Amino acid sequence: MSYPPYAQQPELSDKSKVVAGVLTILLGSLGVGRFYTGHIGIGIAQLLTCGGFGIWSLIDGILFLTSNDRTDAQGRLLRS
């Protein structure tokens, strides 16, 4: 995504989208990837549903790895 030179660049998170994606794929049934990014409510929901029986956590992990607009709990873009 490119921004015009006059537009303010988005602030980057100290969290990595690759780490979040791998954690979500491997430990998504425990909500670990969402806890890592600071999304506590979604992490608890994944924990209580075993990651949506594995389907939710797999899709969520793939989206973390392939999407460039994922954010942490403060709304900052995750680093690549």
Image: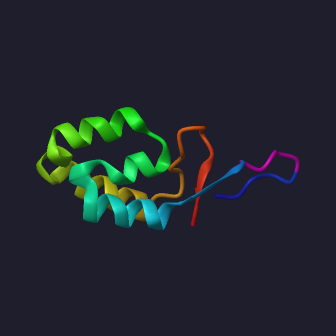
Instruction: Residue at 22%, 48% (x, y): give it.
Output: 56
**Colouring rule applied to residues:** rainbow
- Left or right: where does residue 28 sit relative to residue 67? left
Q: Quadrant of the N terminus?
A: bottom right
Q: Position of residue 61 (x, y in %)?
A: 33, 59
Instruction: Residue at 20%, 47% (x, y): give it.
Output: 51
Q: Nearer the viewer, residue 17 or 29?
A: 29
Residue 66 shows up from this direction = no
Q: What are the residue bounds of the magenta stretch? A: 6-10
Q: Quadrant of the C terminus?
A: bottom right
Q: Is residue 13 magenta?
A: no
- Left or right: where does residue 18 sit relative to residue 74? left
Q: Residue furthest top?
A: 41
Residue 13 shows up from this direction = yes
Instruction: Residue at 88%, 47% (x, y): give it.
Output: 6
Q: Residue furthest left?
A: 53
